[in-house]
């Protein structure tokens, strides 16, 4: 008589199952009348189904309990993730949102359908996954979720991303309009309230030239910012040589500044309205607009324009070399603007024009 082979079940060591909720799932499947899905609804993954069959004797005391509202948790995680690179608008993230680093580990996973690796996973990110309905696979190497939950997460994520882009765009333009209003107010402070004229000092003249030189040095090497610099030079050249009744205006789309970064946009309006003393033709600067019109300073002389253009890069002085931003127009006399310092008689002595300054600026202190 052949010896009886040991039972496959008796001979196989029972495999440890880490997720206590699988035991509950196995007990539930033992009741034929109960046809619900997993503890969070939906179908179980193959790994979870296999785990449920092996976990009959595992107690469920340590099973993680959902804290409710996984949709709300996912929306908060998306907000924390998308706004992490927009520190200016950090107040847009609702209270109670997860730590951005935890949210990033979850949302930056290459493919949630393939599972999220546990290796290197932060405890906060692990908590998010569990509350969203993810569970460990049999090997304990990944967190997985069923197909219906993954589809719902993807749909909510797309909606959150769309809301983020729309909201950030709105906030950027609102912030730009606010900064524009501040720069215009600073420019108005040097002018007489009634006549709009001002008395230039040597300090103002030197600061004007330095501000333009610093702006050019900082931004001219970035190809995407060169059209603004070229447009500014062209605007100054358009003004040069014109009579007292011909004042040039430069119309710019807000997007020409805002879409190139808030630092550049803020520095550009500061250069225009504070240092170059352009005048805004639009009064309601704090309101969002499609385009703005800036009027060249009526007290800017032809001689000063020569000095300013001299500090700009060569590409900005050659027509057709680089595309330029904005459009130019000579304002009619009825617009109320007229040049009052064409010959430069009202110009203050600019320190950079002195021979001593030219020699001193080329010396290196030992």
Image (tube, rainbow, N blue to C red):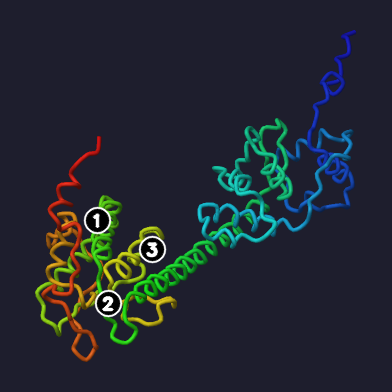
Query: Which element type, helix, strand or loop, lies under badge 1?
Result: helix
**Few, some or many C-alpha atoms within 10 Å of disc 3 (few <14, some 14-19, many ≥20)?**
some
Residue at 28% across, 61% down? 207
Q: Which mark is residue 340?
A: none
Q: In the image, residue 314 lies at what x, y percent?
A: 15, 54
Q: In the image, residue 256 lies at what x, y percent?
A: 32, 66
Check if mark 2's residue and mark 3's residue have beta carbons within 8 Å: no
Check if mark 3's residue and mark 1's residue have beta carbons within 8 Å: no
- On the image, numbered disc 3 is attached to which residue? 266
Closer to the camera, 95 or 361? Answer: 361
Marks 3/1: CA–CA distance? 16 Å
Q: Quadrant of residue 232?
A: bottom left
318 relative to 232 in the view: left or right: left
Q: Quadrant of residue 7?
A: top right
Closer to the camera, 92 or 127? Answer: 92
Foreground mark, 2 or 3, reads 2
Marks 2/1: CA–CA distance? 23 Å
Q: Which quadrant holds the C terminus?
A: top left
Marks 2/3: CA–CA distance? 24 Å
Against 251, residue 70 (above or below) is above
Residue at 64% across, 51% down? 150
361 relative to 84 in the view: left or right: left
Query: Which element type, helix, strand or loop, lies under badge 2?
Result: loop
Q: Residue furthest bottom?
A: 334
- On the image, numbered disc 2 is attached to which residue? 198
Q: Which mark is residue 213?
A: 1
Q: Residue furthest front?
A: 356
224 relative to 284 in the view: left or right: left
Q: Earlier in the sequence, mark 2 or mark 1?
A: 2
Q: Which quadrant holds the N terminus?
A: top right
**Few, some or many C-alpha atoms within 10 Å of disc 2 (few <14, some 14-19, many ≥20)?**
some
Residue at 15% across, 74% down? 239
């Amino acid at each position: 008589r052949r010896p009886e082979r040991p039972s496959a079940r008796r001979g196989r060591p029972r495999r440890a199952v880490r997720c206590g909720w699988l035991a509950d799932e196995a007990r539930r499947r033992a009741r034929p009348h109960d046809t619900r899905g997993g503890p969070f609804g939906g179908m179980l993954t193959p790994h979870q189904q296999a785990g449920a069959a092996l976990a009959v004797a595992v107690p469920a005391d340590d099973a993680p309990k959902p804290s409710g509202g996984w949709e709300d948790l996912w929306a908060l995680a998306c907000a924390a993730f998308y706004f992490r690179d927009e520190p200016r608008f950090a107040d847009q993230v609702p209270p109670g949102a997860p730590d951005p680093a935890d949210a990033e580990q979850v949302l930056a996973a290459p493919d949630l359908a393939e599972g999220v690796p546990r290796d290197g996973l932060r405890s906060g990110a692990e908590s998010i996954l569990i509350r969203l309905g993810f569970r460990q696979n049999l090997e304990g190497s990944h967190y997985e979720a069923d197909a219906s939950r993954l589809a719902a997460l993807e749909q909510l994520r797309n909606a959150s991303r769309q809301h983020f882009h729309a909201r950030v765009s709105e906030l950027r333009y609102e912030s730009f309009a606010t900064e524009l209003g501040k720069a215009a107010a600073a420019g108005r402070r040097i002018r007489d309230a009634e006549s709009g004229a001002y008395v230039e000092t040597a300090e103002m003249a030197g600061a004007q030239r330095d501000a333009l030189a610093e702006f050019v040095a900082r931004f001219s090497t970035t190809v995407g910012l060169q059209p603004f610099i070229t447009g500014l030079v062209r605007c100054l050249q358009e003004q040069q040589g014109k009579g007292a009744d011909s004042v040039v205006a430069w119309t710019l789309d807000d997007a020409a500044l805002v879409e190139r970064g808030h630092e550049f946009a803020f520095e550009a309006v500061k250069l225009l309205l504070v240092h170059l003393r352009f005048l805004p033709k639009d009064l309601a600067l704090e309101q969002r607009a499609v385009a703005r019109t800036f009027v060249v300073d009526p007290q800017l002389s032809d001689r000063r324009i020569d000095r300013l253009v001299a500090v700009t890069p060569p590409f900005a002085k050659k027509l057709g070399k680089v595309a330029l931003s904005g459009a130019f127009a000579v304002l009619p006399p009825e617009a109320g603007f007229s040049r009052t310092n064409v010959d430069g008689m009202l110009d203050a002595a600019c320190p950079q024009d002195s021979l001593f300054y030219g020699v001193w600026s080329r010396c290196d202190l030992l």
